[in-house]
Image (cartoon, rainbow, N blue to C red):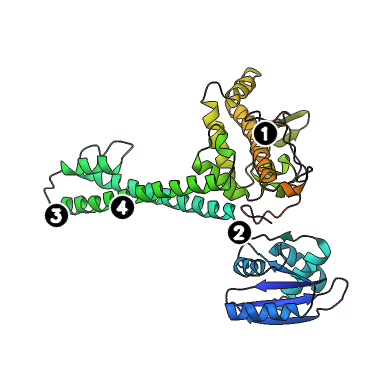
Amino acid sequence: MVVIGVDPHKSSHTAAALEPGAGAALGTVRVEAALPGYRRLLAWGRGFGQRRWAVENAWGLGRHLAQWLVARGETVVDVPATATARVRQLSRGRRKNDALDAAAAAGVAALQGDGGLVAAEGASTVLGMLDERRSNLARQRTRTVNQLHALLRDLLPGGAPAGLTAGRAAGILAGIRPASPAQRARKDLARDLVEDLRALDGRLKTNRKRMQDAVAESGSSLPGIAGVGPAVAARLLGRTGRASRFPTAAAFAVHAGAAPVEIASADKTRHRLSRRGDRRLNNALHTIALTQARMPGTRGRVYYDAKIAEGKTRNEAMRCLKRRLADHVWRVMTADERREAPAAGPGGHTGTTLTSSAAGPTPTADSSDKSLPGPATHNPTAPNHTP
C-alpha cells in the first residue's frame, strides 16, 4: 500500500508518494489547483497501484481536492496540519517546503494513524451550511435593528420601544414629520433600514424552512426531544457530523464543552463549566437545557429540580442538565445512524450504548458531576464532518 501525501495550497498542490517502511519518497509531483491539475494528479497516483491519499487539512484548504478524489472512488484520509508539522520537525528539523510537507502528511497517515477517513459530504454538511447562513443573517439583522434604533432615537423623543419589527418601525415612521434636512435624511435612511429588515426577515424564514426540510430528509429523531426545533437540530447535526466518530458519550461531551472540569485544591474539590470545545454545539445544548428547565413536566425539568433540591445552585444544576443532555443527544444520533445503516451489524459503532435513548432526555447513568479525561482520539479540526 502506497500512501500519497498532499500539501494543498490555493494555487497549487504538491504530492509525495511514500511506501511504509521506506526511507525516501517514491516520487513527487506539483500540479495546479484546477481540474486539469486534479486529473494529472490522479493519473500520476494510479501509477502506484494500491494506494490511499493523505490530504493535509482535508476539511479546509484541501476540501475540494479531497472530495473530488472521494467522488472518484479513491480512499482519502485527513491529516491535521499540526500532526504534519510535528513529524516534519522530528524528522528533518526546521526545514520546510511543499514536498517535505506532503511527505510528512503521508508519513503521519501511514505510520502514526493520525489521519481520519474522509467521506463524501452529506446531510450534515448541508445543515452546517444552513446553520452558518442563519447565524450570519441573525447577526446582520441585529446590526440593522440597532442602526434603526439609533436613527429613531433622534427622530422622536425616547426613541422606539424594544422588540422593534419592520411593521412597527414603518408605523412609527409614518407618523414622523421631519422639520429639517437632517431629519428628512434620517427618515429616508430609516426607511431603507426598514426595507433591509423586511428582506432579512424573509431570508431567515426561508432559511428556517430549508432547515426544517433538510432535518426531515435526514430522518433524524432529534426533533422528538423537547426543546429541539429545526434550527437547534440543524446545528447539532451540522456541527457533529457522524456522531459515531466519538467512541463514547463522554468524548462527545468533551468536544461540545459540556463535560465538567474538576478544580481541586488541598481537601476541596469542585467542578466548573468547561470553556473549551465547540461553542456553537454547546450553545445548542444550552438552548435545549433552558427550554426543558422552563417546561414543567419534562424529564429535564424534573432532573433540574432534583439537583436544586440537593443544594446545588441554579448554574450548577444547569451544568448538570447540559451534561446529561449531551449524553442523550449523542445516543439519539448514534441510534439514528444504526437505523440508517443496518449493515453495520448488531454491535454497531464502538462505545455506543442506547439504553436510555428512547426513554427521555436523560441517560440512565448520572455523569453530570464527574470530570472527564481529555477527548477520545478523533479529529477535532473537523467538528461538523465525518472524519
- Picture quarter containing residue 74? bottom right
Q: Are marks 3 and 4 in contact (CB under 8 Å)?
A: no
Quadrant that contains the C terminus: bottom right
Left or right side of 283 for 326? right
Residue extending farthest to the right is 21
Asked if 143 appears above or below 261 in the picture, the reply is below
Residue beneath the point at 75% across and 37% down = 353
Q: Earlier in the sequence, mark 2 or mark 3?
A: 2
- Picture quarter containing residue 319? top right
**Please, what is the three-letter code of the amino acid marked with disc 3?**
Pro
The residue wearing badge 1 is 357
Q: Position of residue 163 (x, y in %)?
A: 33, 37
SS category of the residue bearing label 1: loop
Residue beneath the point at 65% across and 64% down = 58
Q: Earlier in the sequence, mark 3 or mark 4?
A: 3
**Please, what is the three-letter code of the amino acid marked with disc 2?**
Glu
Kindly identify which numbered label has been placed on residue 181.
3
Q: Position of residue 339 (x, y in %)?
A: 67, 43
Q: Earlier in the sequence, mark 2 or mark 4?
A: 2
- Crowding near the residue tagged with mark 2, few <14, some 14–19, many ≥20 C-alpha atoms within 10 Å: some
Q: Is residue 97 visible?
A: no
Between marks 3 and 4, how big is the CA–CA gap? Answer: 23 Å
Q: Position of residue 16 (x, y in %)?
A: 75, 77
